[in-house]
Image (cartoon, helix red, strand yellow):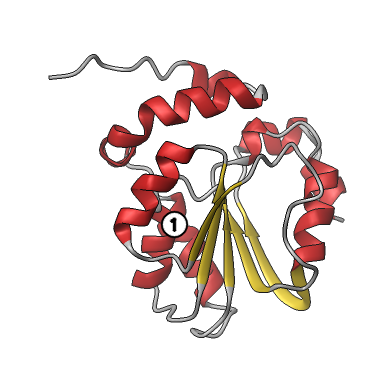
Amino acid sequence: MGEKLDHSWLRQGSTDGKEVKSIYDTWAATYDDTVKDWGYQAPGEAAKLLRADVPEVAHILDVGCGTGLTGEALRHAGFVGPIDGIDLSPESLKEAKKKGHYTQLTEVDLQQLPLPINDNAYDALLCAGVLTYITNDAALFREFARVVRSSGTLVITQRTDLFHERKYDALLA
């Protein structure tokens, strides 16, 4: 059995892209099992929220798709349209590709803006469990608004403590 990874760094949430990439590349092969053991439910809950507001044929962008748990949750929620995923970790993207839920997977560093995505490319965007690692939330949110059609829907998760600390209520207003 392999060496158990120390996940205590998650609480701090590094915003150093190289560090985050390295950690998730190392963790990719065991990530799904680890978060399942933790009872992590954000992908499924976020997919249900999106499904309540978005047609099943919508073109969706999964931001920070990781190993593809959200793509899997979107398919289980009934989405049949194209789902594209972007993530910092190439090893996580390899795991996501194995699941077969994505139309396109692209390595993207969310700290490097603008995103390499056309304006109004998506009907919806889902970003679960990613914003802890972002330094410029406002700029990234503007990018989300740019790549999603004006009638589109965004579902974003954030840790409660960081939601308040980073004043997301004011940012979203």
Location of residue 27 by image quarter: top left
Q: Is residue 135 above or below residue 68?
A: above
Q: Is residue 129 left or right of residue 71?
A: right
Given the image, on which type of amino acid does mark 1 rest?
Thr
Which residue is disc 1 drawn over? 70
Query: Are there few (<14), some (14-19), or many (20+) residues within 10 Å of tag 1?
Result: many
Position in image of residue 21 (x %, y %): 54, 29
Location of residue 34 by image quarter: top left
Of residues 172 and 23, which is closer to you in this image? 23
Position in image of residue 164 (x %, y %): 74, 36
Of residues 64 and 11, which is closer to you in this image? 64
Task: For residue 137, say whether it is visible.
Answer: yes
Task: For residue 13, say whether it is visible.
Answer: no
Question: Residue at the spot x=75%, y=58% of the render?
Answer: 144
Location of residue 163 by image quarter: top right
Q: Is residue 16 above or below residue 124?
A: above
